[in-house]
Structures are given as structure tokens and as C-alpha cells.
Image (cartoon, rainbow, N blue to C red):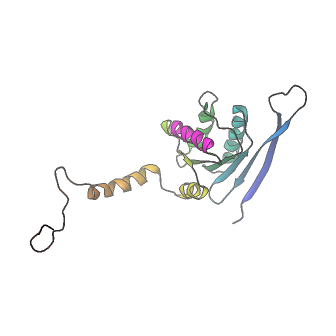
Amino acid sequence: MKAALLPVYKEKLYRDRPPRRLILRTMEYRISDENGFLRAELLDRETPDETRKFLNAVVLASIDHPCSRVLMYVRLSKPLFTIERHGVLRTLSKIASDPMHKIALLGDTVELGMSHDYFSLLGRQRGIRLRSFQREAEAVEWLKDRRRGDERRQLERSFAPFQQRRAGERRKTQRAIGPSVPV
């Protein structure tokens, strides 16, 4: 199945208002409907306001194409650590209203990965299923898994008693046949 492409949005902004000449830069984002999830790519984002505009577009796309599983791939952008102050989680909670929602974050630098780890921690504390990934294949696999997080944990717990020893129980060792002779 071929992915349906949604329009590419570009926004021209000026960097830090240089005194003599203007440096024009463009923030871009592209949102496409993949097989089972939305893919939202963000390029050259610098400000929290740009982040907010991108996330609002993602929320609108998730409403237009009823899909609550989103892969957000951020590239060539500055990390953002002040997400609570700028209402980023409040915006994502609109996607999280669907109980089957999942949001995967992917960045192209170590700094973005650290920012996304912090972002996903705060989101999970508020009940948003949000995870940060280093590889796209892992993110897609997680998004396509239809089990809920608590179902997966129950499955893991069902095997836990077999893996743990009882208190005070020693591990069985195999003993050599015959008397032990010091060498």
C-alpha cells in the first residue's frame, strides 16, 4: 500500500535579526499517512512556537485521518527542554484522548534524543503513551504492536515467578561423579 502524502508546509522566518543582512531560513514539516500510523517529519525547528505549530498540525492530521499512532521524526533541529512551559504536552494530550494512542519520537542527534527522553518521561507521567527511539525500525515496530502496555506487562509478569528463586533457595549445581581430588 502506497503512503498518501499530505501537503508539505514551509514557514519562512528570520534568524535572530542580524543587524545588516537578513538570513532567511525555512522550517518545514511533512505529515504522511503510512500503513497504520501517521509519519510527521519536522526539519529545521528552532523555537518553541515552531514546535507548537507543528504539533497542532499533527493533531489536526490525526483527526482528519483517524489515526492515534504517530511517528514524529525531528531532524536538523535544536533540542527543546522547556516543554511544560510551552504547552507541548497539553497539545499532545488531544491525541492521547484515544485509549489506543501511541506516539514515537525519533531524532537525528544525541541532544535531540536526550530531549525526547525527557519529553517522553513527562508525557508518561501524565498518562500519554510516548516513547523515544534511536532507530526508526524499532519505533515502527512499537507503533504497529496492537497490544496495550498493561497487557504486555501482564504477559511479562506471568513468566516472572518461574524465573525467580524462592527466598533462601540455592541454585542447583551439577556435581562430578566420583570423589573430588585436589589437583
Q: What is the quadrant of the C terminus in the image?
A: bottom left
- Looking at the image, residue 146 sits to the left or right of residue 57; the answer is left
- Looking at the image, residue 145 sits to the left or right of residue 95; the answer is left
The relative height of residue 135 versus residue 74 in the rendered view (above or below) is below
Percent of width and height locating residue 95: 60, 42
Q: Residue furthest top?
A: 19
Percent of width and height locating residue 169: 17, 54
Dominant secondary structure (helix, strand or loop) of the stretch shown in magenta: helix
Q: Nearer the viewer, residue 97 or 128?
A: 128
Whether residue 175 appears in magenta in the rendering, the answer is no
Q: Residue furthest right?
A: 20
- Magenta residues span 110-123
Q: Nearer the viewer, residue 96 or 66?
A: 96
Percent of width and height locating residue 47: 72, 33
Residue at 82% over, 39% down = 25
Q: What is the quadrant of the N terminus in the image?
A: bottom right
Q: Quadrant of residue 113?
A: top right
Q: Residue furthest left?
A: 179
Whether residue 114 appears in magenta in the rendering, the answer is yes
Q: Nearer the viewer, residue 8 or 13?
A: 13
Residue at 53% over, 41% down = 128
Percent of width and height locating residue 67: 63, 51
Residue at 28% over, 57% down = 163
The relative height of residue 82 versus residue 99 in the rendered view (above or below) is above
- Looking at the image, residue 29 sits to the left or right of residue 108; the answer is right
